[in-house]
């Protein structure tokens, strides 16, 4: 969603980097380009004006030319103001001392309220809570049935009756207390447009169940219209937070940047896909980093950790250890590709990487179809061939190519790149490229041992993954672009390049 905005902003910063010293005229010109980029992204005009004024006052007040990297100082100022516009810090959810904690969802029809209700219930379950869903949308055909189907995926019960929305909501609250449920999520009806009948119904439901949180479910693809919708709901029912849906769409993303500043309530959650698991807490600093091309490796590491539990986590940790040590096999390589699918696929992983690394992968021709052909090649090998690729000769390559629907050239290229990757990972280990001295044969290098406490495989894997991923962002905590005087990393090598 933010690709166009990210590209325009990074183009502005690239032009500033070529200037070296920055004059006030250069900053004014850059701010004009940033303003046009934000307006092109459908950010509300009032929000753009306030953002531009704040960045200008800070940039002109700072003595940028005394800094080691003046352009980087401008990037830091823009990043800080983006975080401020998006809400500052992630919203924390507290629970009522006397259960249940009541959550009321409101919004227009088609914004994704019913799906968001099931996703929110799944999130509460992941926090150790026992939610109950209440279907109070009795005006849309099959709305309650849709809620039941989605709730079954996340193992959450649904309460609804064929009466009226207010009575259903009140009865649902009584049912939650009877069952001992500590969270109640009420899904209400919507309209095509904001009207008084919709507001009156939401207000009546709110008076009946006295919600602790009233969330507006807002479609992120409606642009500046999101500001008007948010303001009307906030004036009528009093919002506590916003849930942004369809953040994986191809719209310009102005709603995400506008709603916090214009409506005055934070964004609590973001829906990033159609699956019930595509739902996460909204972190303003991480989204600002993605917009400026810095990546969002923390969210990627959290998704990787959440994708595996128990025995799967131990297996994933072992495979990651072998990959990082350069001792992995084609089976491990295949498993890593399948793990990436659980994280949302290659496109979602690249969206979380810093722009430089994502661009390298794109230029190298890495895409989902090519990864699928690589998987087909590996699946056409025998277990022995996956463990020892060196035994694959010409006749074996022809058999593998025929079984996978590829060519012998593609098989050979995969094997060459796999061998090069394993060699590279071995050389990247501490001391991996040094020759052992005489007399050291059979001894382990000092400091190379690792003692892992029982049950610590998952934590160790997540920590190692995060530590290595953070190296992509640079030692300054996520600065956009390479450090002055540094050499860019070499291109990636993939089959078919």
Image: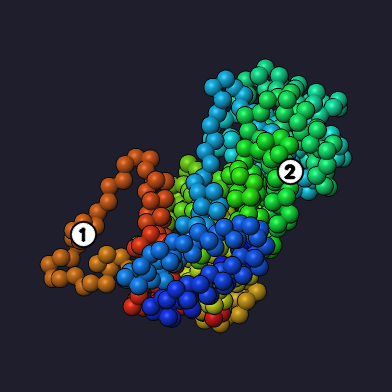
Q: Residue 213 location in percent, x, y? A: 63, 33
Secondary structure of the residue carrying numbered label 2: helix
In the image, residue 201 sits, relative to residue 379, either above or below, namely above
Local packing at callout 1 (Cα closer than 10 Å; few below 14, some 14-19, many 20+) is: few
Q: Residue 375 location in percent, x, y? A: 58, 66
Q: Quadrant of residue 373?
A: bottom right
Q: Which residue corresponds to mark 2?
A: 232
Residue 444 is tagged as 1
Residue nearer the viewer, 84 or 124:
84
Regarding residue 490, the answer to whether it shows in the image is no
Residue nearer the viewer, 361 or 315:
361
Q: Residue furthest left?
A: 439
Q: Quadrant of residue 177?
A: top right
Local packing at callout 2 (Cα closer than 10 Å; few below 14, some 14-19, many 20+) is: some
- Image quadrant holding the C terminus, namely bottom right
Secondary structure of the residue carrying numbered label 1: loop
Name the image colouring.
rainbow
Q: Residue 299 location in percent, x, y? A: 50, 53
Earlier residue among tags 2 and 1: 2
Residue drawn at x 64%, y 44% is 242
Residue drawn at x 56%, y 52% is 86
Front position among marks 2 and 1 = 2
Residue nearer the viewer, 400 or 152:
152
């Amino acid at each position: 969603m933010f690709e166009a905005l990210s590209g325009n902003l990074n183009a502005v910063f690239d032009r500033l980097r070529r200037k070296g010293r920055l004059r006030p005229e250069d900053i004014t010109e850059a701010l004009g380009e940033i303003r046009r980029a934000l307006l092109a992204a459908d950010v509300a005009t009032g929000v753009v004006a306030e953002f531009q004024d704040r960045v200008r006052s800070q940039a002109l007040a700072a003595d940028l030319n005394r800094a080691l990297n003046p352009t980087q100082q401008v990037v830091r100022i823009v990043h800080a103001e983006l975080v401020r516009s998006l809400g500052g810090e992630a919203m924390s959810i507290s629970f009522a001392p006397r259960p249940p904690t009541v959550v009321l969802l409101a919004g227009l029809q088609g914004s994704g309220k019913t799906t968001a209700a099931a996703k929110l219930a799944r999130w509460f379950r992941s926090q150790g809570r026992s939610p109950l869903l209440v279907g109070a949308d009795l005006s849309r055909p099959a709305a309650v049935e849709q809620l039941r189907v989605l709730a079954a995926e996340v193992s959450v019960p649904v309460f609804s009756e064929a009466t009226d929305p207010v009575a259903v909501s009140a009865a649902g609250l009584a049912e939650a207390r009877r069952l001992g449920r500590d969270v109640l999520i009420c899904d209400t009806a919507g309209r095509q447009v904001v009207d008084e009948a919709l507001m009156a119904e939401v207000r009546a439901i709110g008076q009946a169940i006295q919600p602790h949180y009233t969330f507006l479910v807002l479609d992120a693809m409606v642009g500046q219209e999101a500001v008007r919708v948010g303001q009307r709901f906030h004036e009528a029912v009093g919002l506590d937070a916003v849930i942004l849906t369809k953040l994986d769409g191809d719209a310009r993303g102005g709603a995400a940047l506008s709603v916090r500043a214009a409506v005055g309530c934070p964004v609590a959650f973001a829906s990033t896909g159609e699956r019930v698991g595509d739902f996460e807490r909204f972190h303003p600093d991480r989204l600002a980093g993605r917009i400026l091309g810095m990546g969002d490796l923390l969210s990627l590491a959290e998704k990787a950790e959440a994708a595996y539990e128990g025995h799967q986590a131990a297996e994933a940790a072992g495979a990651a250890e072998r990959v990082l040590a350069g001792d992995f096999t084609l089976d491990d390589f295949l498993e890593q590709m399948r793990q990436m699918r659980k994280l949302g696929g290659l496109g979602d992983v690249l969206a979380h990487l810093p722009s430089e690394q994502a661009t390298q992968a794109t230029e190298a021709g890495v895409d989902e179809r090519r990864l699928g052909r690589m998987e087909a090649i590996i699946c056409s090998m025998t277990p022995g061939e996956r463990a020892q690729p060196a035994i694959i000769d010409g006749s074996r390559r022809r058999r593998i190519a025929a079984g996978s629907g590829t060519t012998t050239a593609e098989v050979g290229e995969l094997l060459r790149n796999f061998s090069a990757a394993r060699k590279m990972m071995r050389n990247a280990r501490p001391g991996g490229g040094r020759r052992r001295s005489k007399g050291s044969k059979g001894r382990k290098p000092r400091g190379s041992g690792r003692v892992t406490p029982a049950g610590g495989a998952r934590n160790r894997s997540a920590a190692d993954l995060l530590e290595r991923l953070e190296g992509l962002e640079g030692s300054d905590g996520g600065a956009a672009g390479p450090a002055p005087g540094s050499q860019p990393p070499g291109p990636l090598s993939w089959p078919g390049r």
